[in-house]
Amino acid sequence: MRVISTNFIPDQSRPRLTTSATSAVDLQGVGGNWATVGRRSRGGRRVHRKREKRKGKSVGLRIGTLNVGTMTGKGRELADMMERRKVDILCVQETRWKGSKARSIGAGFKLFYYGVNSKRNGVGVVLKEEFVRNVLEVKRVSDRVMSLKLEIEGVMLNVVSGYAPQVGCELEEKERFWSELDEVIESVPMGERVVVGADFNGHVGEGNTGDEEVMGKFGVKERNLEGQMVVVFAKRMDMAVVNTYFQKREEVQEWRTRVEVGAHR
């Protein structure tokens, strides 16, 4: 299972906090959140087609992703939002917290985070406290990439939080981010599940001419360099830009979907 994200949707119930849409996630399949990249199934069939029955465990989770702008002063607000939307795991970006720690943010949620500068970047993963004891490993790669490995009911789940450099950043910094993300994904053992919640700061664009194998027609805006990097990454990792297969409706405040993907490799 692999999932990656890029755009965000306003939380209409709490105007001050912009959040991504969240979705139900089955550990044999992934619900989309933001513009999502998920692994294509073998044989060239795309992930949005009807699910085939598979053997193995099925564990229901709700996973989201959110660029918080800063975690300072937002801990309880974030916890309340997760509780209200029944989110189990949330990847967060631009935390702007320096350090390598885990701390409670209230309402039964705990944030694992990493940052090297209190003025920029920083990533983290928020868990419901009932899942904290399931954490087997925390990899704090950089202030733009970190991951958690959990074992839930016998299923190994890797949750990756990523924050890509903005449009104006140096190419070297962008290449370093993609190299770090590649390294994390490639390190996941065969058969384990992977979910990536990230702010890629890019647009893959409308239409899919020439990229039919990795994306649908329902992207937004025109593709920029950062969006092209997402598409190249999807091709390299045998993945698909999942939510481009689904047409958005403006009146929907919170977009949810369920797609089916294979296990890692």
Image (cartoon, grey):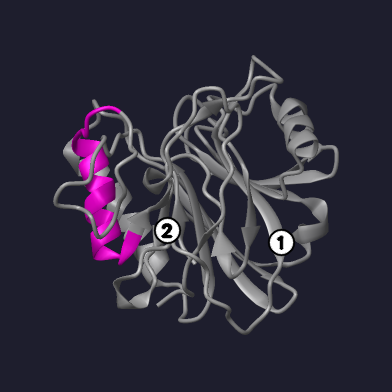
- Res 58 quadrant in image: bottom right
> Which amino acid type corresponds to the residue marked 1 in the rendered image?
Gly
Position of 117 relative to 16 (above/below): below
- Give SS at disc 1: strand
In the image, residue 116 lies at what x, y percent?
Answer: 48, 39
- Res 154 quadrant in image: bottom right
Side of 8 relative to 233 (left or right): right
Q: Main secondary structure of the magenta part?
A: helix
In the image, residue 43 lies at what x, y percent?
Answer: 31, 78
In the image, residue 218 lies at what x, y percent?
Answer: 34, 39
Label 2 sits on residue: 38
Does the stretch in magenta take in 231? yes
> Which amino acid type corresponds to the residue marked 2 in the rendered image?
Gly
Side of 30 relative to 219 (left or right): right
- Give SS at disc 2: strand
Instruction: Give the residue displayed 60% in from the left and 68% down from the top.
Output: 157
Magenta range: 221-239
Residue extending furthest bottom? 55
Does the stretch in magenta take in 77? no
Mark on residue 60? 1
Instruction: Give the residue displayed 78% in from the left and 64% down from the top.
Output: 133
